[in-house]
Every structure is written in C-alpha cells, then in structure tokens.
Image (cartoon, helix red, strand yellow):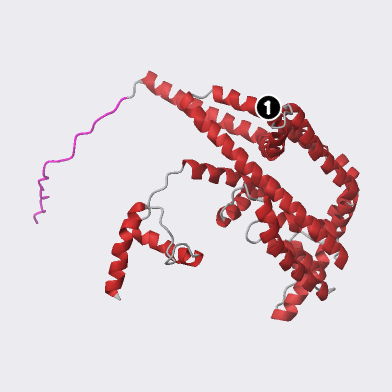
Amino acid sequence: MKTAEPRQVKTPPSTAAPVRLIAFEQRALRRSVLTVLLIVTLWMVALWIFQSISHFLFLLMLSWLFAMAMEPAINWLTERRWKRGLATALVGGLVVLAVVGLGAMFGNLFFNQLASLVESLPDVITSVISWANSTFKLALDPTTVTSNLNVTPSQVGSVASNLAGGVLGVVTSLLAAVLNAVTFLVFALYLAADGPRVRTTIGSWLPPARQDVFVTVWDIAQAKTGGYVVSKVVLAGLSAVFYSIFFYLVGVPSWLPLALLVGLMAQFVPVVGTYFGILIPILFVVFTSPVTAVWIIVFATIYQQIETYVFTPRISTRTMDVNAGIALASVFIGAALWGAVGALIGIPIAAAIVALVDTYGRRHELVPALAAMNEPDQDESGHGESGRGESTHPDLDDAAPATAASDHATS
C-alpha cells in the first residue's frame, strides 16, 4: 500500500517590508532618561510645596480681596491729602474696631444661640420627617436619617458643648485661627498700604508691552472686584440687621445666627440663596408656631422688594453684576476647593475673571439667525419706534430691510 507523499505547496514570495533595527546611542538615551526623571522630580517637588503652602496662599488671596475692599475708602482719604500709610491704618483700624466691638457686644450671645441652634437640629429633623411621613405617606426612620446626616444627639452635643464656651473658649481652643487672622490682617494692610509699590515692583519684571496689560488688569480687578465685595458685604450687613430685629420681635429662637445666615446666603449664594436662607428659620418655627412662619414669608417678600429697588441700586451703582449661572457655579467651585469661606469668595474671583474676559475677550458680529434670537427681548424692552432694538452691528442693520421684505412676501 502506497503512502501518500506530502504535497509541496509553493508559497509566494513575501512582500513585507524588511525589518529595520533601531539602535539608541547610549549616551543620548541616558541623558534623555535623566532629563525625564528630573522633570518628574521637579514636578513632584512643586506639587508638594504647593500643597504645603496652599493654606498660606489662600490667606494671601483673602488678604488681597480685603485690601481691594478697603481701596475705595483709602483712595477717598488720599484724595484729601492723607498719606497712604496713615489712611490704610485708619481704615483698617476702624474695620478691626468694628469687628471687635460687634464680637464683644454680640459674640457671647451669638455662640450661645448657635449652640442651642445646633442642639435643636435633631428635633427639627425629626419634626420634618414626621410631617413628610404623615403628608406623603412615607415610611422614613428619623433615627436613620439623623445618623446619615451626622446630627445624632451625641455628635450634636459634643459640637454644642464646644460652642457654648463663648468667644473666649473658642479663641483659646483655636489658636491656629488667631494666627491665621493675624497673618490675614498683616498682609491685607501691607497690600493696601504698599499697593502702588507692589504694582511697580511686579511691573518692573515685565516688558513694556506687558506692563500696560498688567496695569489694566490690576485696575479692573481693583475697581470691579473690590466694589463688588464692598457692596455685597454692606447688603449682607443690612439684611442681617433687619432680619435680626424682625426675628427678635416675632420670637424666632436663635434669632441672631439665623439672621446672619439669611444675610450671607441672600448675598453670596446667587439665585437660590434667599429661598434657602428663609427656609431654614421657617423650619425652626413652622411646627411650633405656623403663624410665625407665615410672618417670616411676608417679611421676606417685602424686604426683598425694598432691597431690590432701594438698597441695591444705591449701593451697587459702580460695581459689576455677574451672570447668575456663573455666580452659582463659582459658589460651588469655591466651596469644593476651600469650604464655606471659598463659597463666599468664589463670586468676587469670578467677577474679576469676567471683567478681564469682557476687557480682552474678542467679540464677533452675530449672523442674522443668531441676531434674530435677541429680537423678542428687544421688543419687550421697548427700544426703537417699531419695538425693534437698534442693532450694534452694521452688517445686521443692512440685512434688516431684506429680512423684512422676505417676511412680507411670505405673509
């Protein structure tokens, strides 16, 4: 029996490209590896240094904002032939005296009321959950909710005991806060007193073409952001004063910290700050005195109109307004980066950025399709004889008759 011989299959010649060997010069390779390692090491060291001094940089930024807030008063004094150092000392001293005086007058009352406010949080949450269960037929467990929110009686008691010690107890237990306050005040006064010298020193390191840009950027940040901070602080103070008087008269418990919370949230948390600020004191009284909650809503509605049409136009005439979406995003970003203080300074920083973008950003003319989207707003504002606002773009003005003719032909 013959065995089958294996068939030989002819393979076509390979068309693959020839293999090329790449050789690295050892000295160049060693130099490249060392360069990459050096760059990575320097980057890690820079990150470590930044993390180590990030708290100081944050205090420095706060000092810069406070120095800009004092700038209008300092300029008012220097225009009347006061020396800048003396004017800075006077303005800063008045601010410190005001803070110390308010702390001496209301500090102990504030911390005692804040402690009682914290102690009442579990009862308020339990009342809200009971109302929600009975109204919406839910089955929420108050103990589980308070535990998830970290407001159990034991945790709240420890926080309240620390707060009830008054101003002296808080200051003595937080020596780091005193050091931070001193650092903040010293740098704020230095930046305010030597502002022109700081600008000239920084400008001397820049080429002449960049010095004009630097001066413009500094002036915008100082005029707009500083005025924004001052206006918001004044409006928040007015709001806190009026709300504290009203809360005291109607018998709201912990009226001082709640009024301060309403004032801060209404000014530094855009869009929803007023509503959340009012909702918190309402929750503390609605289950014990519903009539008081109704009075709070009525007073908030009236005061909001007074603030919008009387206080704000007179205080914020020279400050810039920030888009509500940008302001709200800046609050969340600032809170994520620096906590509660970051939420307060997020909007001033956003105001400076928006001012710079408006100054150096390049705007383009709108195409007719986009320009037509502004027509309803212009009609409502009543600009122009026909209700159509005057266009700021000549190309769009030239295109308006053609558009009107086509609309007439279509109709």
The residues colored magenta run 1-23
At a point 84% along the width and 74% down the height, the residue shown is 289
* Residue position marked by numbered label 1 in the rendering: 194
Left or right, 177 with reference to 304: right
Image quadrant for the N terminus? bottom left
Which quadrant of the view contains residue 140? Answer: bottom right
Residue 223 image position (x, y, % from top left): 61, 40
Give me the residue at 72% from left, 38% from top.
73
Q: Position of residue 33 (x, y in %)?
A: 44, 25
Q: Nearer the viewer, residue 404 or 120?
A: 404
Residue 293 against residue 179 in the figure, above or below: below
Residue 13 highlighted magenta (yes or no): yes
In this rendering, position of residue 301 left or right of residue 411:
right
Q: Identify residue type, mark 1.
A: Asp
Q: Residue pushed farthest top?
A: 27
SS under mark 1:
loop
x, y percentage for residue 94? 81, 38
How many neighbours does mark 1 have within 10 angstroms: few (below 14), some (14-19), or many (20 or more)? some
395 vs 288, left or right, is left
Q: Quadrant of the C terminus?
A: bottom left
Spot the residue most to the front: 385
Count the labels in the image. Answer: 1
207 w.r.t. 145: above or below: above
In this orientation, does residue 340 appear? no
Q: Nearer the viewer, residue 109 or 79?
A: 79
Depth check: give the residue in front, 50 or 320: 320
Q: Magenta part mainly helix, strand or loop?
A: loop
Residue 40 x/y as whole percent: 51, 30
Q: Nearer the viewer, residue 59 or 170?
A: 59
Q: Quadrant of residue 218?
A: top right
Rendered residue at 58%/57% (across/down): 324
